[in-house]
Image: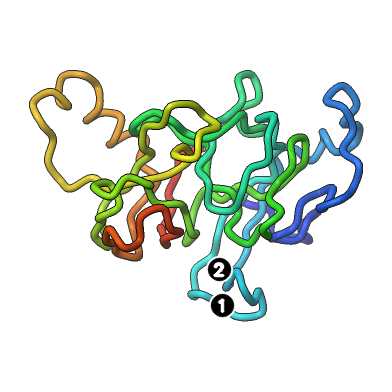
Amino acid sequence: MGDTGAAPVERGATYYGTSGTIPASTAYGQSVGLEGRPHVFPDTNPSNRQVRRSQNDVRAILVRNSSGFTIYAGQIVLWASGYRGKRVAGLTNTTACEVAGVVDDHVGSAGVRNGDLFWLIVKGPCLALLSRTAAEAVISAGNVVHAVTAATSGATTAGRFTDWAGTFSATETTNGTAANIVMNKLGRAISAATTGNTGALRLVDLNIAT
């Protein structure tokens, strides 16, 4: 259950902001104690947090970006080895891999710098980045969605999703893909998409196991 008291960082913000000095990883200091702190927020519009997007709540975890690069709103990320529930190490780049969550869709265009703390969204409505591949960008509202393959965890095609059309090929039933889609689903698409939405942010009802 998330903490419903005062959030240590506002949604859409990061602990060190866009220009604060982020200490070296060996000296994160008191901020280490905030890693993994949960919080429940109302579902609000990223462009105006005073307006509700829905009557749902959003469950978030305050985590550290330890990927080595800046990450951005809507990107899907992986847990850092040895820091599950506390730090993320990069973007998803394997089909239907286990995901940590989605970078808060309220974060501004400056993104989350390496070493900073931010809200990772794991349950409830959140904008996430759709695949940059046209065939994977055609999705239906209500379909289960999962991470897509990319060359590396820092590639422009990484940290994105597609949907599962509802059937598995013979190969997928034997190579582990079917099980991964079932076990590692992000949730279900709220917004449908076509090839005209390739690479765009689309709304997903997240339900990520943590």
Q: Is 139 displayed left or right of 91 in the figure?
A: left
Q: Position of residue 157 (x, y in %)?
A: 44, 39
Q: Position of residue 156 (x, y in %)?
A: 49, 40
What residue do we see at 23% from left, 47% from top? 135
Q: Amino acid at mark 1?
A: Arg
- Nearer-the-camera pick, 8 or 46: 46
Residue sitting at 52 percent across and 29 percent down? 153
Q: Is residue 105 above or below residue 120?
A: below
Q: Dot 2 surroundings within 10 Å: few (below 14), some, or many (20 or more)?
A: some
Image coords of residue 52 (percent x, y)? 56, 77
Residue at horizontal 62 percent and vertical 33 percent from the top = 88
Between 80 and 112, the one nearer to me in the picture: 112
Q: Are marks 2 and 1 in contact (CB under 8 Å)?
A: yes
Q: Residue furthest bottom?
A: 51
Badge 2 amino acid:
Asp
Residue 59, placed above or below residue 65: below
Query: On the image, which quarter does residue 27 sit in?
Result: top right
- Residue at horizontal 71%, vertical 54%? 110
Image mark for residue 52: 1
Could you say whether the residue bearing mark 2 is in a helix, strand or loop? strand
Q: Position of residue 72 (x, y in %)?
A: 61, 49
- Looking at marks 2 and 1 on the same chain, the residue that comes earlier in the sequence is marked by 2
Q: How is the image coloured?
A: rainbow
- Number of callouts: 2
Helix, strand or loop status at disc 1:
strand
Residue 80 vertical position relative to residue 164 in the rendered view, above or below: above
Tag shown at residue 43: 2
Q: Residues within 10 Å of mark 1 (few under 14, many from 20)?
A: some
CA gap, disc 2 and disc 1? 6 Å
**Direction from residue 209 to residue 17 in the image, left or right:** right
